[in-house]
Image (cartoon, helix red, strand yellow):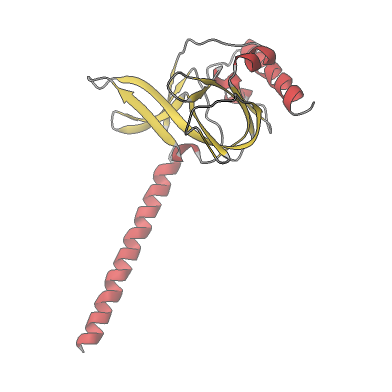
Amino acid sequence: MKTQIGSKMKYTVSAIVLILACFFIFFLIKLNNQELKVINFPASYISYDSESDLSKSADIIVLGTPAEEFQSRKHQEVRHEDGSLADFYTLTDFKIEKFLKKPEIVHPNTINDDTITFTEPISIIDNNGERAIISLDGYQELEYGENYIVFLKDNGMGNYSVINMNEGKFNLQKDEISQLSSHEDKEASDRHSQIRREVLKRYINN
């Protein structure tokens, strides 16, 4: 009798643990897929209006695809002592298909096997107790499952960063002009499309 009771208790405990685990997984999935508020900050940066200028300035030009969904990447935020936001960025692991430009010496730990890690000017932060996406100049993250040519430069902090904001990364499958939330004017959209055509002509369709 004691054996039967003990067995029933074990099954009950196992069932409870399984149910709790399912709820926890469901919560994580829901948290990961929730629609987050987007906060855009204006930015001052060196911009390039042509593929040739962009290519000359970049230390690394790489073709590949993000290794993870955006919300699963390493999001960083730096705070002042008073709690105000000092800096933010996302460390993105990027699967390398091909280097189109690469210096002889690169920062250690940025390239591992077939992956390069660099920063994007966007992150997920704690905004008064709620998670929010924060971006510089309307920068849109590299989409998981899409192939890109990305232009990177040494950021002086032992790593590489995307340069030229949205015009420093080019989706091979589609023109992402519609995603340039802070560059809605026609001139900026046309410039992005023109640079993209130049980039694809030089590195893909040559």
Q: Name the spot of residue 15 as percent of width and height, x first.
A: 32, 69
Q: Nearer the viewer, residue 31 or 83?
A: 83
Q: Quadrant of residue 143?
A: top right
**Vertical position of residue 42 compared to residue 108: above or below:** above
**How many numbered circles are shown?**
0
Quadrant where the C terminus lies?
A: top right
Quadrant where the N terminus lies?
A: bottom left
Q: Residue at x 49, y 33 (%)?
A: 92
Q: Name the spot of residue 198 as percent of width and height, x first.
A: 73, 19
Q: Residue at x 43, y 26 (%)?
A: 89
Q: Name the spot of residue 13 as percent of width and height, x first.
A: 27, 70
Q: Residue at x 33, y 24 (%)?
A: 78
Task: Residue at the far bottom: name it.
Answer: 1
User: Horizontally, is 193 left or right of 165 in the view?
Assistant: right
**Vertical position of residue 18 compared to residue 23: above or below:** below
Task: Residue at the far front: name it.
Answer: 104
User: Horizontally, is 120 left or right of 81 in the view?
Assistant: right
User: Horizontally, is 103 left or right of 39 in the view?
Assistant: right
Q: Name the spot of residue 110 as percent of width and height, x first.
A: 49, 32
Task: Residue at the far left: name it.
Answer: 2
Q: Residue at x 45, y 41 (%)?
A: 72
Q: Nearer the viewer, residue 116 or 9?
A: 116
